[in-house]
Structures are given as C-alpha cells and as structure tokens.
Image (cartoon, rainbow, N blue to C red):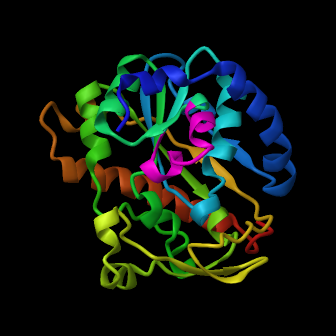
Amino acid sequence: MMDGTELDQWDPDVARQVKSLADPIVKWWFRSEVRGLENIPGDGAALVVANHSGGMLTPDVLVFAPAYYRHFGYERPLYTLAHYGVLLGPTGALLRRLGIVHASRENAAAALHSGALVLVFPGGDYDAYRPTAEANAIDFNGRTGYVRTALAAGVPIVPTVSIGAQESQLFLTRGHRLAKRLGLPRFRLDILPVSIGIPFGLSVIVPPNLPLPTKVITEVLPPIDITARFGTDPDIHEVDAHIRTVMQTALDRLASQRRFPILG
C-alpha cells in the first residue's frame, strides 16, 4: 500500500504527452464519444462513479481521461483508483504519473480533499469481465464503499456510463467457481475469466486478446448530492441502489440506440 505521496506523482506534462498518443487510438480504433462532460462540476472535488468494461485491456480510462483534459485542462488532476495488480511491474511508475493510484480509502480521501476529480469503478474486474450476455448490466457486486467515500469527503457523485467495450471480445464466464477451487481468493483473485477473441482465441485471463474496434460511447450524467437528496444520515444501500438505477436507465437508453454490435 502506498502512502499519500503516491498522489504527488501525477505529472501533467506526462498526462499531456500520453493524451496526444491516445487520441488517435480512441478516435480511429474505438471511434469514441464522451458526452455530458459539462455535468462535471467546474471546480472542486467530485467522485466519478462508472461501470467498467472490456476485460484486462479495458479502454475506459483511455477514452475518458483525454476527453476530460481536453475539456477542463490540466489544472485539476484526474485520479483513477485501480486494483493493486495494475500498478505492479515496469509500467507502474508511468501509470502513477498519469494519476492511476491504488484503490484505497486513504488515497481516495486525500485526492478528494485536494480538490481533484476521482474516477472509480466499484465493480472492478468483476464488472469488466461480466459475460457478454450481461454486457449492458450495471453490477457492482454489492460494493458500496464509494458511497461512504463520497459522504466522508462531502463531495457529489457523478454517475457515468459507458457502452461498447464489452463487445471487444466474447466474454464467456467470470470463472468465479474455478478461482475458488484453485484457492485464488487468497491472492486477492476472486475470478478466473474465460473469453474468446483475436488473435489468441480462447483465453483464461492470459494471454489477453486485443480489443476489436468496437465503438465506445461514454456519457457523464448529472451529479448527485447525497446529503441534499438523502439527508445527513443516509442509508448507504438506498443511495447505492438509487445510483445504480440512474446508471442502468442511462445504459439501457444507450443500448436501445445501438444498432449493431461493434459497429455501434
């Protein structure tokens, strides 16, 4: 676990350079659209809560971050809370300079108190590896910590939904039972997902198939002031249910507008 100095590694110059490299990918490969950025408060901290899609090579942050910086500039950092495994290995230092930090309440609190925007995917890998048959479902696997984080920091939640990335390959199963049988939860691995894609065909986490050029649309929804809507001592599960309902309604609308898989 990193201490608060992990947040200090964010480097706007590196973020700007990576944005210039990412722009062609998100524009030409994913034909991405990010709508509703005006719903993000213009200043002050906020917690962006999003669904997670696309497996190991998820394009969610690759699509969202450049659009955020294009709209708001680099004065306010965007921090993304990530599973510790994402930051292991030689790319960890670069990712931290891009604002990707360990998903801990300490990091989230420090980032929000600094006035930054924080992006969180409550469903994590459980959500990102949801089966293709459930591609358009909002499922955080019962995780509600994001609500407590927003309440403790006194910041609004900005629900955000994305569609298309779950079409980047065929996701067969999360492999929850198999992971349990193999004792993987002791290593903080609760799933062992199985998918089919290009170029490796059948994949059990590795090797990761390359994402198909699916059209990705991300939509930022109006912010939710928890205290204003639910009072000073809200029921956490009620708040969570409301946010997921708002997101599911928006995702259903985007799904109804989608004509063909991958093509969008």
Q: Is residue 67 left or right of residue 49?
A: right
* Image coordinates for residue 3, horizontal then vertical, percent: 35, 28
Q: Is residue 220 left or right of residue 28?
A: left
Quadrant assignment for the C terminus:
bottom right
Q: How many dots with numbers?
A: 0
Hey, which quadrant is residue 225 in on the image? Answer: top left
Instruction: Report the residue at 17% width, 33% height from top.
Output: 231
Quadrant assignment for the N terminus:
top left
* Image coordinates for residue 80, horizontal then vertical, percent: 50, 38
Instruction: Report the residue at 86% width, 44% height from top.
Output: 24
Question: Residue 183 magenta-drawn?
Answer: no
Q: Is residue 157 above or below residue 210?
A: above
Instruction: Report the residue at 52% width, 42% height from top.
Output: 221
* Image coordinates for residue 152, horizontal then vertical, percent: 23, 29
Q: Is residue 252 left or right of residue 108?
A: right
* Image coordinates for residue 95, horizontal then vertical, percent: 59, 38
Question: Residue 87 magenta-drawn?
Answer: yes
Nearer to us in this view, 207 or 214: 207
Q: Is residue 201 above or below residue 86?
A: below
Residue 141 seen: no
- Magenta segment, which residues? 81-96
Instruction: Report the residue at 78% width, 41% height from top.
Output: 22
Q: Is residue 228 above or below residue 53?
A: above
Residue 184 seen: yes
Name the outermost residue toward the left: 233
